[in-house]
Amino acid sequence: MLGITFIYIFLPITLFIHQQAPMKRKNAVLFASSLLLYGWCDPTLLLALIFSLPFNYFFGLSLERQERPLRRKLLLAAGIFGNLLPWGFYKLAPFLSERLAFPCWPSPLPAVLGFSLYTVQAVGYLTDIFRGESRAQTSFIAYSVFAAMFPKMPAGPALRSQEVRHELARRPLGLTGQADGVWRFTMGLAKKLLLADSLSGAWRQLEALPRPGAAAAWLGIAIFGLALYFELSSLCDMAVGLGKLLGFSLPESFELPYTALSLRDFWRRWQGSLYSFLKTNLPFNQKAPLKAFFLVLAGCIAGLCYGFHWTALAWGGCHGLLLAGERCLWGKALEKAPPALRRGVTLLLVLLGWALLSSKDAAGLWEMFGALFGKNGGGLRQALSLASCCWFALVLAWAEALGGIKRLGRWLQSKSPRLMEILRPIAAAVLMLLCTAFLVGAPAAPLLLG
């Protein structure tokens, strides 16, 4: 979706028309531009939305108006099934086509998380209405903007209706919010093109090695984890920035997950909107066996959002098992450990999880874990060669992922707010020029798990 045409043609025209339109027409402008963009990127995504949006709109109204408990439950079950059907079809069809040589019509959707989080959000919308925590949208256009506005489709965040209900009705566009939106969008774009794409290229170099050694394998999964983090967090940064430009305050989804003190803390910080949905809609407050079951189920759901293959399912299930153990067994002991030890153990478990998620089949998984534990030797020379290709991006990525750049920005802001007001637009202009040069030289790299 990222490209010169989107940034310099589609986006300015959309923002100008949206800015000039009266408030009662702004939602229609945003809805029409979103459909145009989805049809431009992938017509199959547009077809899925044409089915899904009216389906959820009418089911939401029916749930709110229905008073009989049994009928409400049946409506909710039918609504959830209706949302899972296209999601499963679009995930399963390419899977069957690839593995069984069965020709299927749909191509894989263009975003790794986009349609999965859209489905999560649609199910959450219906369950919120069922529980009486939210009202159904009476306007189809307003519901469609809430469900599928283009800023948040690539990687979320997954919203709850009550988070944007006021802004769907009225959203004044101030200069401060517009400036913040430009800065946030530019930072997200720079993270995608300057960091995520460089790290993704280094990871693919490691994948091409016939027998990576231990040092190269450990460096590789660290690069994979950083690349995935910057891909997804950059898309969420751009979504927040575009939301500000359009008058929306979208919630944050990534909050320095590599500084987490536990796996539970990691999932609060990693794709926070997905974590919030699972926490709201699955009954975790049960006795130990049931709590463990629902945690594993939540992990499997999260895993399937990242890919429709068994290693993604296993990655999510393993995270669920570890979360269950943390909740029910060793969590209290872990809280008494020094923070540095807690961060180190959590980071090790997360890295081993990336080794599982990055493998697409049993043979690849066996090779990766064998390499990690010395099956192919030390591999120090391979690791140095790999690091030399992306050392600057790697250092900058770890500095940002561990919060160093954010702390530096806060320190400069506290010391000289006036200087930061001058430097920020200059930095945004320089970063946009760099990103444009990258996009002219080569289009944005495909998503790591896409």
Image: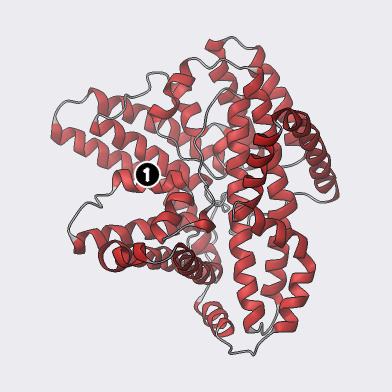
**Residue 185: x, y in percent?**
67, 36
Q: Residue at x 42, y 29 (%)?
A: 163
Q: Which residue is mark 1?
A: 277
**Residue 225: x, y in percent?**
58, 62
Q: Secondary structure at mark 1?
A: helix
* Viewer-side residue, 256 vs 16: 256
Q: Residues within 10 Å of mark 1 (few under 14, many from 20)?
A: some
Quarter of the N terminus within the rendering: top right
Q: Residue at x 28, y 49 (%)?
A: 282
Q: Is residue 68 left or right of residue 109?
A: left
Q: Is residue 184 above or below residue 339?
A: above
* Viewer-side residue, 320 vs 27: 320
Give the colour scheme shown.
secondary structure
Q: Residue at x 58, y 24 (%)?
A: 30
Q: Is residue 278 left or right of residue 432?
A: left
Quarter of the C terminus within the rendering: bottom right
**Residue 443: x, y in percent?**
77, 49
